[in-house]
Every structure is written in C-alpha cells, then in structure tokens.
Amino acid sequence: MDALYTAVATANGREGRAVSSDGRIDLALAMPPALGGNGEGTNPEQLFAAGYAACFASAMGNVGRQLKVDTTDVSVTAEVSIGKDDTGFGLAVTLRVELPDSLAGERGRQLVEATHQYCPYSKATRGNIDVELVVE
C-alpha cells in the first residue's frame, strides 16, 4: 500500500488520555459503566464506532458516485460491542445504514454491500470480527 496519510495517536490505557499528534483529539478515557467504570470519559469502542461510521459513510459517497447514485441523505450508525470470547475479549459491529426512500429495496442493499467491499474499515475487520449490515 502507498500511504497517503498516517494518523498518529497515543493512549495510556482505558482510564487515562488519548491524544492525537496534531492535538485535535485530546480525550479523557474511562471504562464504561457496563465494564465496571465510571463512564466519565470516552472509550475505545466509541472511538472505533465513530471512525467506522464516518469511513463507511464516506466510502458510500465514493461508491455512489461510481454507480451514479445520490447518497446525500445517507446516514451510518456503527454499534461496536465488546464481550468475552475464547481468548479474552472480542468485538462485534452492527452498521445501521439509513437510506432515503429513493434507495429503498434491492438497489439500496446493493449499494451497502458494494460499500462494505470498498470501505477500508470493512476491509480491516473482514474475517476478524463479525460485522452485521442493517439497511433501514
């Protein structure tokens, strides 16, 4: 791969801080209450959900342009779950893609599936974690 951009961030654990090299991200981190924390900060699952949702929505714009489909009113919500698995903890993702009426049915489903093949986050997670696509 020819890198076009590299993001750099440093964190010192789930209950510390996460800071990007350019200072745009500077967040307190905290365990969510469901995992025994106080929830008074963000957590890695929220950050991953935000990144995946943004990337998928952007990728859908690119795929839509290739297919000559208007994706202006598309919205993507990523739900990132963490739970115990055979080796400790694992992640699962549900991507909820809200499409306008003009993309209802099979046409919209094909757009979402094509985007899932194109999106860098989807490529990175493929075969590693469960990703469920829900078209709304």
Image (cartoon, helix red, strand yellow):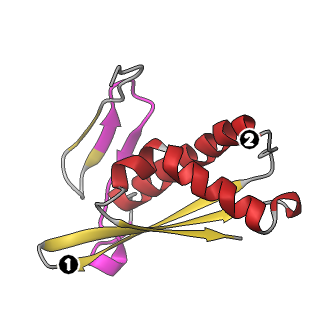
Please name the residue shown 36% across and 21% down the image.
Answer: 3
Please name the residue shown 77% across and 46% down the image.
Answer: 71
Q: Residue 18, position in %: x, y?
A: 31, 43
Quadrant occupied by the N terminus: top left
Q: Is there CB contact under 8 Å for labels 2 and 1?
A: no
Q: Is residue 98 visible?
A: no
Circle 2: residue type:
Leu
Q: How many marks?
A: 2
What residue would you read off at disc 1?
A: 85
Please name the residue shown 68% across and 54% down the image.
Answer: 111
Q: Which region shows up in magenta?
A: 18-39
Q: Is residue 97 visible?
A: yes
Q: Which mark is residue 67?
A: 2
Q: Which mark is residue 99?
A: none
- Look at the image and say whether residue 51 sits in the magenta stretch: no
* 111 to 82, vertically: above or below: above
Residue that protrudes farthest toward the left in the picture: 87
Q: Residue 97, position in %: x, y?
A: 65, 62
Give the camera-side residue of 11 and 117: 117
